[in-house]
Amino acid sequence: MDILFYAFVVFLFAAIILGIEGFYLWWVGAHGAAAQRVARRLQLMSGVAGRTGERISILKQRRFSRNDLADRLLHRAAFAHRIDQLLVQSGVKWSVGSFLTWSGAALLAGAFLVTRWPSPLALQAGVALLFAVVPLVLVRRARVRRLARIEEQLPEAADFIARALRAGHSFTNVLQIVGNELPEPLSGEFRIAREEINYGVPMSEALHNLAARIPLTDLRYLIIAILIQRETGGNLAEILGNISQIIRGRLKLAAQVRVLSAEGRMSAWVLGLLPFCVAGMLVLINPDYIRPLWTDPSGIRLLWYALAMIVFGVIWLRKIIRIRI
């Protein structure tokens, strides 16, 4: 009896030790440093946002949703690819499925809020649709800000690449140095281009992918100069120095134009939002006074005429204050 008891204790101890060791090996294999490096590399290859939000199109396909069925359906839709391109350019860590989910939630929230006040059905539908486009507006705003930051970093990047080339570094090493030394978000894009080249993508294709992720004219000039120099030869460092001077001059001129047109932009915002603000105040303060606008047929026609004139005026003001350089 004692021998069986001691044997059971020994085997139990051995089972516990083996279980602990097995759990340790599983944990190291799934969550260890080596596993995390492999996971980050796979995230970069598959286009899923990792810790640094970097994306690589080496597999030519990004996941649009965590659900496999939704991902397959979204990949068949053309609008989903345009949304994904917008998300990539904005640097937002959303997937297409998350973006559509937030848009649907905003639409339901807007529909719930507008039903709290008496108003015509067309106005309720319009306000609900305005709520639905809030995620799109936020993403486009993030895209504009990110591209503006990248545009400000381009002259420094061009000078940095020129100095590194004069020091004798190869262009692929220069991409790695720029990705490590420059601040975000431009350094992350250069790291992605470097990773694509490491995975066997031709340099011209990697640079074209960089231009697709960052749709800036100045960056395209930079990439075109690099590609032409690789085919025809020449002093690339001097070319990049000239391009950086041109970019700095254009940014300086754009800043001056932005200052001179600030008053016009503010006037456009005031004129565009004033009718809606006045209508909203009247609905809250004295709804009986403004109710004939959507209860009387003449008032409904006036509303449609006013909406058409407002849309025309907003488009006209936008064309006046938008100065392309």
Image (cartoon, rainbow, N blue to C red):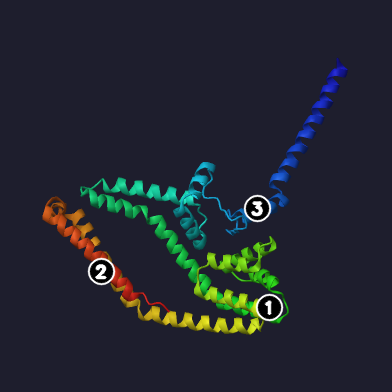
Q: Which residue is mark 3?
A: 42
In the image, 93 versus 289, the foreground residue is: 93
Secondary structure at badge 2 equals: helix
User: Looking at numbered disc 1 in the image, what kind of residue is underneath it?
Assistant: Ala
Disc sitting over residue 164 in the figure: 1
Q: How many marks?
A: 3
Residue 28, horizontal then vertical, whole percent: 73, 45
- Give the residue type that dot 3 points to: Leu
- Write down the quadrant of residue 16 in the picture: top right
Farthest-out residue, top: 1
Q: Position of residue 70 (x, y in %)?
A: 50, 44
Q: Earlier in the sequence, mark 1 or mark 2?
A: 1
- Looking at the image, residue 259 sits to the left or right of residue 295; the answer is right
Sequence-first tag of 3 and 2:
3
Q: Residue at x 82, y 22 (%)?
A: 8
Report helix, strand or loop for mark 1. helix
In x, y percent, where is residue 31?
Answer: 69, 47
Where 194 falls versus 221 (above or below)? above
Disc 1: CA contacts within 10 A as few (<14), some (14-19) or many (>=20): some
Q: Mark number for residue 313?
A: 2
* Mark 1 vs 2: CB contact within 8 A: no
Q: Most extreme residue toward the front, as rendered?
A: 232
